[in-house]
Structure formats: structure tokens, C-alpha cells
Image (tube, rainbow, N blue to C red):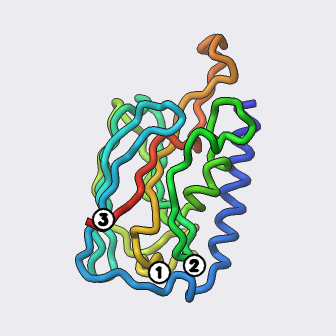
Amino acid sequence: MVQRRTLVARAAIGTAAAAVAALTATQAATAHGSDDEFRGNLKMLNHSGVHGKVRLNADDGTVEVKLRARGLEEMQVHMSHIHGHGDGNQATCPKMSADTNDDGVLTFAEGLPDYGPVMVGLGVDLTNDDELEYERTFTMTGATGIPPNAAITALGDLDQYVVVVHGMTLADDPDTPAVERAYVASLPVACAVIKEH
């Protein structure tokens, strides 16, 4: 079942990327102001215990992202992204009620209607301990942006987006022996709604 979820998540990422790439420039025409600051509090998803803060500074065609998350799994790869709809509609952090098949797990695909597709890949990081912290500057949206590899200003106002951190070990049954547990890199573990500060 974990394997099936991973395949579904990969398919959802591909579908989302294609849909986002098809958006027109008019849908994201609003440009960032100079030296704008946006902040958000990372709140846990999937009962992960992950929490933290994120800050984005938009200035002269760049976006600087500062992220600090705690409660992550040690020695695992954690992805982080800016998610959104790219059309001015507000992205939100999903609730566990978005778990449509009622199995107690909110998958990447189940969260998509709320947080939207990946707009900017912020990083794929291997954690040495339970903490992830970085400061990175972006000038391009990346391969799944709007449109692909567009200037970061194509995102428009940053306060329509969320930042999501991914990656957690998942077992289909809490009584499953540890050797049968699997790490699902796409599983959303924390989300922050971005607001102008």
C-alpha cells in the first residue's frame, strides 16, 4: 500500500507539473514589489510533530527563502516546496479531513486541492538530526513553475502560496514490524501559509 501511495504521488506530481505549465502569463501577471517580506509558521501535517518558521524576502527579481523546521526524521531526505494555484486563488494547508479514503494518512495527492501543485522546489535535503535549516535565493521558478523556468516574479504575490515540507516513515498498520515500515519522501509533514509582514 505504501508503494501504491508513492506511485500515486509521483503521478500526481507529473500531472500537476503539466497543468501548471499550461497556465497563461496573465494568470500570474502581478509582480512582486521591491523588498517585500512574507512569513509563515510551519504547522504539522499527518501528526508528524514537525513545526518551524519560514520567511521569504522578494527584492529586485529574487526571492530569498529562510526555513527552519524541527521534528523531522533523522538521516532522511526531506523535500520542501512553494505550492500554490498560480491564478490568484489562495492556497491553504489541508486538514486531515482531506484524507479521502479515510485511512488516517494525508497523501501528496489528497493535499493537492488545498495547497496546489509545486511552484518552486526549495530543496531536497538529507537531515543529520531532526532539524532542517537553510537560506537560499531563487531567481527562477524551476522545472514545475509557472511557466517552467520562468523568472521568479511570474509567481505574482507571494501571499497566495504556502510552503510545504515532505517526508515521513509510514506503515499501513501500527503493529507492522519496523523492518516492514517504509519512508515516503512525498508525504506532507508540515505546511505554512505565507502572509505579508
Residue placed under numbered mark 2 in the picture: 147
Q: Secondary structure at mark 3?
A: strand
Give the Cα distance between marks 2 and 3.
22 Å
Give the Cα distance between marks 1 and 3.
17 Å
Residue placed under numbered mark 1 in the picture: 154
Q: Position of residue 76 (x, y in %)?
A: 47, 34
Q: Is residue 144 left or right of residue 162?
A: right
Q: In this rendering, which labeled residue sits more in front, label 1 or label 3? A: 3
Give the Cα distance between marks 2 and 1.
8 Å
Q: Secondary structure at mark 2?
A: loop
Q: Are circles 2 and 3 on residues that touch, CB within 8 Å?
A: no
Q: Which mark is residue 92?
A: none
Above or below 139: residue 197: above
Instruction: Give whichever of 21, 35 is nearer the camera.
Output: 35
Q: Residue at left 50%, top 31%?
A: 47
The amino acid at mark 1 is Ala
Above or below 52: residue 142: below
Q: Are circles 2 and 1 on residues that touch, CB within 8 Å?
A: yes
Q: Residues within 10 Å of mark 2 (few under 14, many from 20)?
A: many
The amino acid at mark 2 is Pro
Q: Secondary structure at mark 1?
A: helix
Q: Residue at left 37%, top 69%?
A: 138
Above or below 186: residue 117: below
The quadrant of the picture occupied by the N terminus is top right
Instruction: Give whichever of 57, 43 is nearer the camera.
Output: 43
Q: Are circles 1 and 3 on residues that touch, CB within 8 Å?
A: no
Q: Which mark is residue 38?
A: 3
